[in-house]
Image: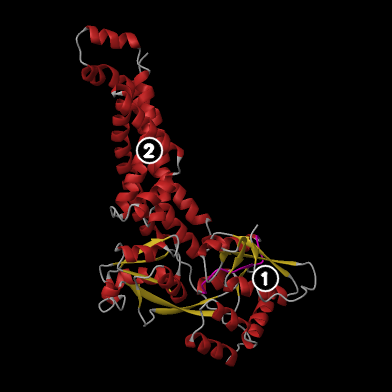
């Protein structure tokens, strides 16, 4: 298990009690990242702050790895005591959880290519252009508002690294994210400019389960003490995240410490307000699955025919393709198509998704068709040859129709599986049904209703297909 690495540890923890805190090391610096010197440890300013809180409580910190999007649900389940990994403060978060006072103020800033710095300074100037960000964040909600107001095209990512890479590569026109993330990407990637005027401001907070208000109050007291003695500033400076704006925020906070943090109530969006977006995402999923399956069927037939009728070289080449595709994860194949080959061919995200899923399933389809073709009785083939039919005529008139009947059931199963596997394409920015459901679940703080809706929509798409396949099987069956 990863452990924390922090320079603020006192000589004694005052006991063996543990403060379990959850974060996502995949998020990277300056929040939480694996220590290059010792990958079993984590480091970052959230690691420092979690350690300060633990020692302030007389405990020792213990890090728990959790996906960033699952921090809220995991803290309520009791997987850990506090959640920290650049958790953004927002009204609906306070409605569902106990939330600390904000310990860091960030600014939502636009990053653009240097050539576009003069014309893309605001969201209004990006009308009709693609702007990337991390899904289920404040920045994503800002882009959704800008979509309705200005016609901006939001592009959702599962991480905060690929948006900037796509910006430099020309797939995006701008990226909207926290200034600390933008600065890190500027140092890491280069080739971009951060616009000086912020689009909005936000705050990072410590997240606790809704009934842990006593612990929340203790956390607040420790955070204020670390603000006063300069420990937080020291950590932020160490991670190049301190500036005049942060100093001004600390001064305002310490100069006006509230006796009780304000609780802003917000109305959780109703189910009906999410149905249009889920419907659009379902259409994306269906279109993606249909197009990918068509590609898989055509390519699978060609591969199967090549492995039966081709020369030894062609058979060997096609066999190698099938084994490589079946032996490597489809997720890896999507990454290679979309990101790995971007210097050679820059595929649109949807086209890369269709191509990746289609070519992956073509390997499986080819084995179905090859098995079905080889299942046709040899005397039938010999009789057809005796009658003078060519191999193509035998395939078209004798072998193919019978093989199709044998392959129909597994083909249907593969299409249903492909429909579900389409959820993987969110990693290359395609917002399909599962991704939109995850955004919905994050916003409402629960997977119960979003998950049920998602399941119903998937069933509505897959059950009619299964019914059609059974009907065709009955019509084509022979005694």
Main SS, magenta residues: loop
Residue 390: where, in percent of width, then height?
20, 15
Q: Depth check: 338 or 297 in front?
A: 338
- Number of the label disc, if any, that sits on residue 277: none
Q: Is residue 119 visible?
A: yes
Q: Depth check: 270 or 335 in front?
A: 335
Q: Which residues are magenta?
A: 79-89
Contact between labelled residues 2 and 1, with CB atoms less than 8 Å apart = no
Residue depicted at 45% across the width and 66% down the height: 269
Residue 324: where, in percent of width, then height?
42, 37
Picture quadrant of residue 387: top left
Cα distance, mark 1 to mark 2? 48 Å
Residue 180: where, in percent of width, then height?
47, 75
- Number of the label disc, if any, that sits on residue 361: 2
Residue under circle 1? 212
Residue depicted at 39% across the width and 33% down the height: 320
Q: Residue furthest bottom?
A: 255
For this view, does 391 lie left or right of residue 1? left
Give the quadrant of the N terminus: bottom right
For this view, does 110 lie left or right of residue 387? right
Q: Is residue 185 magenta?
A: no
For this view, does 293 lie left or right of residue 184? left
Q: Is residue 81 magenta?
A: yes
């Amino acid at each position: 298990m990863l452990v924390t690495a922090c320079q603020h540890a006192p000589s004694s923890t005052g006991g063996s009690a543990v403060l379990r805190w959850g974060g996502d090391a995949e998020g990277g610096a300056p929040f939480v990242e694996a220590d290059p010197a010792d990958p079993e440890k984590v480091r970052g300013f959230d690691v420092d702050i979690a350690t300060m809180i633990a020692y302030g409580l007389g405990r020792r910190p213990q890090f728990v790895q959790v996906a960033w999007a699952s921090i809220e649900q995991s803290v309520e389940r009791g997987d850990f005591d506090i959640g920290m990994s650049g958790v953004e403060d927002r009204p609906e978060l306070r409605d569902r959880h106990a939330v600390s006072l904000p310990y860091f103020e960030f600014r939502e800033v636009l990053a653009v290519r240097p050539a576009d710095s003069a014309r893309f300074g605001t969201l209004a100037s990006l009308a009709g252009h693609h702007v990337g960000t991390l899904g289920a964040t404040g920045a994503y909600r800002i882009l959704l508002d800008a979509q309705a107001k200005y016609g901006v095209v939001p592009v959702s990512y599962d991480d905060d690294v690929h948006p900037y890479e796509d910006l430099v590569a020309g797939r995006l026109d701008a990226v909207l994210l926290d200034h600390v993330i933008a600065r890190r990407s500027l140092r890491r990637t280069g080739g971009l400019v951060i616009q000086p005027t912020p689009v909005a401001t936000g705050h990072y907070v410590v997240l606790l389960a809704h009934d842990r208000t006593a612990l929340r109050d203790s956390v607040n007291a420790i955070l204020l003490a670390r603000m006063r003695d300069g420990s937080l500033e020291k950590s932020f400076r160490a991670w190049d995240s301190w500036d005049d704006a942060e100093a001004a925020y600390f001064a305002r906070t310490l100069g006006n410490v509230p006796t009780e943090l304000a609780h802003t109530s917000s109305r959780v969006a109703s189910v009906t307000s999410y149905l249009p977006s889920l419907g659009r995402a379902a259409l994306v999923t269906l279109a993606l699955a249909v197009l990918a399956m068509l590609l898989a069927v055509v390519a699978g037939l060609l591969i199967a025919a090549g492995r039966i009728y081709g020369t030894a070289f062609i058979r060997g080449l096609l066999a190698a393709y099938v084994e490589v595709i079946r032996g490597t994860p489809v997720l890896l194949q999507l990454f290679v198509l979309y990101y790995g080959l971007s210097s050679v061919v820059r595929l649109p995200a949807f086209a890369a998704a269709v191509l990746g899923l289609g070519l992956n399933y073509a390997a499986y389809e080819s084995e179905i068709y090859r098995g079905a073709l080889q299942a046709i009785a040899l005397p039938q083939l010999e009789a057809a040859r005796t009658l003078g039919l060519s191999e193509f005529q035998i395939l078209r008139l004798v072998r193919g129709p019978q093989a199709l009947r044998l392959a129909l059931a597994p083909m249907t199963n593969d299409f249903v599986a492909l429909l579900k596997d389409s959820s993987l394409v969110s990693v290359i920015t395609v917002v399909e049904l599962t991704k939109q459901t995850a955004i919905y679940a994050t916003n409402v703080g629960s997977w119960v209703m979003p998950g049920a809706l998602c399941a119903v929509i998937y069933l509505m798409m897959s059950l009619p297909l299964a019914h059609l396949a059974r009907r065709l099987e009955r019509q084509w069956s022979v005694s």
